[in-house]
Image (spheres, rainbow, N blue to C red):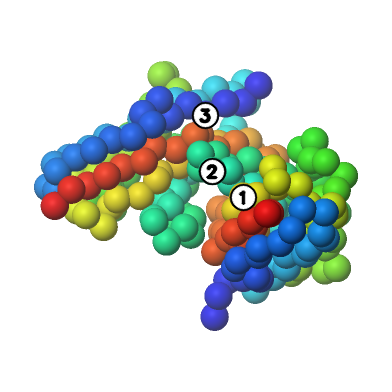
Amino acid sequence: DTAVSQTPKYLVTQMGNDKSIKCEQNLGHDTMYWYKQDSKKFLKIMFSYNNKELIINETVPNRFSPKSPDKAHLNLHINSLELGDSAVYFCASSQTSGRVIQYFGAGTRLSVL
Amino acid sequence: AQKVTQAQTEISVVEKEDVTLDCVYETRDTTYYLFWYKQPPSGELVFLIRRNSFDEQNEISGRYSWNFQKSTSSFNFTITASQVVDSAVYFCALLNTGGFKTIFGAGTRLFVKA
């Protein structure tokens, strides 16, 4: 049973479209994250949610809108996709007290044409 | 400000060689966590180790060992007798206690040739 699962694994779309990526964790963690990994492998946090509340928004354009319907889910919706949005997006989760280790999903490779 | 520096962009070794990946961090906090993650060619991010700032004991796990030195703000990772399967990008990361933001280094790409 996958601990952090995100779908889809690949997403190819045209500029200007809107798309969503879903993430679910079954670890019982209270915090979830979205990261963007660019073509040079640099990993940067985008958002962090704790108990469904937005904690961190790292100056991400407001075309990106995360939604956390419950503690186990954190979805990412992207409006008006641009070429520069092409990247791998990782979802992660952790428990803020205790082990604090972040566990990552397998990633979603987004290609904007 | 928090920062993680992995100065080695790429390292290439021949199988069975030992290799050390360097990580230097900056933080003003006295309590924090350090991590190493592995990203193999398949793309997933695999947790390797967590170390908290109060525990400076070195750790060994099989062929992997970690050297944490607070005095030099370093958390280096050594692979002994490297294998082709060790080929991956390795990330060092820093999290302040009570924080929700993990800062990752730029990663070191390790090539292990047969």
Q: Chain of mark 1?
A: A
Residue beneath the point at 42% across and 19% down: B71
Q: Point out the tag, 2 or 1, that comes first from the N-terminus.
A: 2
For badge 3, the amino acid type reads Val
For badge 1, the amino acid type reads Ala
Residue beneath the point at 65% across and 21% down: B1
Residue beneath the point at 82% across and 54% down: A16
Task: Give the SS element for disc 2.
Answer: loop
Residue beneath the point at 18% across and 48% down: B113
Q: Are marks 2 and 1 in contact (CB under 8 Å)?
A: yes
Q: Which mark is residue A39?
A: 2
Tell me the distance, in whole angstroms, between the alpha carbons under discs 2 and 3.
19 Å
Q: Is residue B54 above or below residue A67?
A: above
Q: Nearer the viewer, mark 2 or mark 3?
A: 2
For badge 2, the amino acid type reads Ser
Q: Is residue B31 above or below residue B38?
A: above
| Residue farthest to the bottom, as pictured | A1
Is A99 on the left-hand or right-hand side of B50? right
Q: Which residue is mark 1?
A: A87
Local crowd at mark 3 within 10 Å, few (<14), some, or many (≥20)? many
Q: Which mark is residue B4?
A: 3
